[in-house]
């Protein structure tokens, strides 16, 4: 049986869901820490994202 969590305290309905999410998140963080590929500079990432946003806005009509 799973303990119900308060929506004021947690975004999860049960402790099992919260624990599952915690395990998933920790695996993702560890995989990132273990990744041997070189990092990408913040400015480069931001420039690439800006290009993607600009392209999407142009396709949509430029709003």
Image: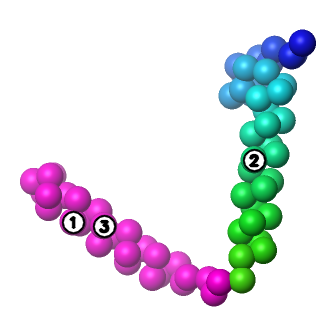
* Image coords of residue 53 (percent x, y): 29, 63
Q: Is residue 50 magenta?
A: yes
Identify the element where label 1 is drawn: helix
Query: Would you say 26 lies left or right of 50 here?
Result: right
Q: Which comes before the other along the chain, label 3 or label 2?
A: 2
Residue topped by disc 2: 24
Quarter assignment of residue 52: bottom left
Q: Mark 3: few, some, or many residues within 10 Å (few <14, many ≥20)?
A: few
Identify the residue shown where x is 74% and y is 50%. Answer: 25
Identify the element where label 2 is drawn: helix
Which segment did they paint magenta? Answer: 37-63
Residue topped by disc 1: 55
* Image height of 22 relative to 56, above or below: above
Q: Mark 1: few, some, or many residues within 10 Å (few <14, many ≥20)?
A: few
Choose between 19 and 10: the one closer to the eye.
19
C-alpha distance separating marks 2 and 1: 33 Å
* Image height of 3 relative to 31, above or below: above
Identify the residue shown where x is 52% and y is 78%. Answer: 42
* Image coords of residue 20 (percent x, y): 79, 37
Query: Would you say 16 lies left or right of 43 here?
Result: right
Q: Which comes before the other along the chain, label 2 or label 1?
A: 2
Quarter assignment of residue 31: bottom right
Quadrant location, the N terminus = top right
Identify the residue shown where x is 45% and y is 82%. Answer: 44
C-alpha distance separating marks 1 and 3: 5 Å
C-alpha distance separating marks 3 and 2: 29 Å
* Labelled pair 1, 3 in contact (Cβ < 8 Å): yes
* Image coords of residue 27 (percent x, y): 78, 56
Q: Is residue 13 magenta?
A: no
Residue topped by disc 3: 52
Q: Majority secondary structure of the magenta segment? A: helix
């Amino acid at each position: 049986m799973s303990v119900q969590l308060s929506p004021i305290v947690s975004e999860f309905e049960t402790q099992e869901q919260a624990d599952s999410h915690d395990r998933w998140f920790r695996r993702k963080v560890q995989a990132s820490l273990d990744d041997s590929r070189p990092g990408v500079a913040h400015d480069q990432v931001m420039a690439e994202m800006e290009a993607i946003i600009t392209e999407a806005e142009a396709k949509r009509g430029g709003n």
